[in-house]
Amino acid sequence: WSSDVCSSDLVVRTRLVGLERAAAGWRAATLSADGERFAIEVPWVVNAAGLEADRIAELAGLDVDALGWRQHPCKGDYFSVAPRLGRLASRLIYPLPVAGGLGVHVTLDLAGRFRLGPDVEWVDALDYTVDGDKAEAFATAARRYLPEIRAADLSPDFAGIRAKLQAPGEDFRDFGIVSGDGMVSLLGIESPGL
């Protein structure tokens, strides 16, 4: 392992493969996309690895299951609404929450176009494909607050995967920001706004 990276360097396209305590903080073993292995010694680790935050905590020797930090990937699909219906919504609209999420709601992009989503689908693998067969379920959910919406008005748009701390069927658990021993871990961070 080489260790020629300075603390002010930005290291990209690199995977963290080991994390251990060092005299001045932490020694992070990494593997670059080119297969180069090198180590970085840092006084603090900020674990903001999203869907892999629990893996990083495990690399640091933490028992994520005992601590309740195991993350569970939850996919959410979005459908765009036909432009001709663009005047139906000019603000966010949230229905009553459903198990695992906020329910299919109206979101707006910077151009004022609106989408419906996300839904809640617990997944074992990271797949960002939007299932077009869900259009009717999305239209049905949206008709509770926008009765004009029909499945034919919807087009598959994009999907995201949230890191949830609760497993399917468990009670809601909010995100955690935990610090100690020279490490700050952000776990179960679902909202892009956070």
Image (cartoon, rainbow, N blue to C red):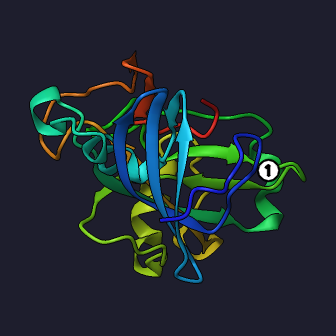
Q: Is 134 placed left or right of 58 in the picture? A: right
Tell me residue 182's x, y (percent).
Answer: 44, 22
How crowded is the residue under tag 1: few (<14 C-alpha within 10 Å), some, or many (20+)?
few
Q: Residue at x 46, y 28 (%)?
A: 25
Report which quarter residue 92 is drawn in. Answer: top right
In front here: 32 or 95?
32
Tell me residue 166's x, y (percent).
Answer: 22, 37
**Mark 1 — residue?**
109
Q: Is residue 109 above or below residue 41?
A: below
Q: Residue at x 79, y 50 (%)?
A: 109
Q: Residue at x 27, y 26 (%)?
A: 173
The residue positioned farthest toward the bottom in the image shown: 34
Q: Is residue 118 above or below residue 153?
A: above
Q: Residue at x 53, y 41 (%)?
A: 41
The residue positioned farthest toward the right in the image shown: 111
Report which quarter residue 80 is drawn in. Answer: bottom right
